[in-house]
Image (cartoon, helix red, strand yellow):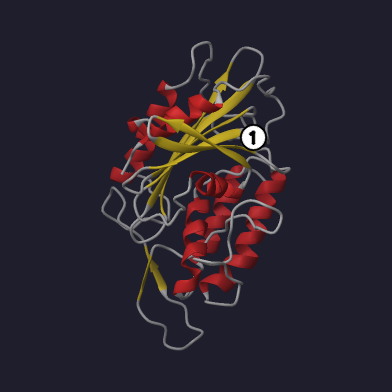
Amino acid sequence: MNENDLREALRATMTAARTPPPMESAAAVAAGRRAVHRRAWTGAGATAAVVAAVLVAGPLIAGGDGGSRSGGGPVQAGGPPRPMPTASAPATVTGAPSDAGAETKPSWPLDGDGRPQEDATARSGERYEKGRQLLDVLLTVVPEGYTKPEGTARDGIPLRDHQAAVEDHNSWGYLASAAVADGTGTGRLLAEVHTRGNGLPAGPCELAAEFWGLGGDCHVVRVGRARVGVATPSGSDTRISQWAAYRHPDGIVVYVAQSRTATNAEPGLAPLKKLPLSGPDLAKLAVDPRFHLS
């Protein structure tokens, strides 16, 4: 399974959504919507995500008993007992079911052509352009001595990419990734931004733990008055080598991350021997106003 297969599987799950979940599942739904536009780089990760989307999203969306946690639903980040985020219901659901088992019709935000989006992902318009802007900013922070490859890997995964996806009624997520090379290996830089109303934690390390459900080992780095969570993987999931997390006072969340590999599904690209940025570098970028996108 490649990344395009994963994306289509998640979209198929979302468009089959049923009645919105009860309020106690709101946190799980938000996590699921954030997961829709993330890219799984490993075959095992892709397979697990699709299985989770099929087996977990349906019961949650239908309001079934999927477990609970303090402050939200069953999807949590990091650690052995915590499942990966899964796809979930669309941003808006219109109409009413004729009976308890009837399905409702999803209604997506308008795309740039004035028509409803096909799914959570914007393909044109203002939100799409915000995703493109995030990629442009990410490319400007590639350190000196690294090149910025273009094109696609052998499995078709783009070496540069961006997305914008609606996460709930009031929140959008932007994701950008760019391959970086130093002549001996190729890795990747990423940035992910969640607009206001995202429901993510306020604490720096709690926020860092939510990134891609990685959990991780975290410490706090101060950038001026800002407290930024900087984390590294603590388990077997090595898609991301290091990341920083910051929640702005207005609620906008910024993640900046790096990986030694450009894509784990591409065996032809040797990994970087050294990460392009230090932990403090990532922390400074996380608070950089250029990544503060509403």
Front one among 152 and 41: 41
Neighbours of disc 1 within 10 Å: few (<14), some (14-19), many (20+): some
In the shown orientation, is residue 135 left or right of residue 150? left
Front one among 137 and 263: 137
Q: Is residue 155 above or below residue 120?
A: above
- Residue at 38 percent of width and 39 percent of height: 131
| Amino acid type assigned to the residue bearing label 1 in the image | Asp
| Residue behind mark 1 | 155
Residue 145 location, x and y as percent?
A: 53, 10
Front one among 200 and 186: 200
Secondary structure of residue under mark 1: loop
Quarter containing the C terminus = top left
Front one among 213 and 124: 213
- Residue at 55 percent of width and 63 percent of height: 13
- Residue at 41 percent of width and 31 percent of height: 135
In the shown orientation, is residue 275 left or right of residue 32? right
Q: Quadrant of residue 96?
A: bottom left
Question: Would residue 180 be seen by someone viewing this image from the given angle?
Answer: yes
Q: Is residue 69 above or below residue 76?
A: below
Question: Would residue 20 be seen by someone viewing this image from the given angle?
Answer: no
Residue 267 location, x and y as percent?
A: 72, 29
In the shown orientation, is residue 99 left or right of residue 153? left
Residue 247 location, x and y as percent?
A: 41, 44
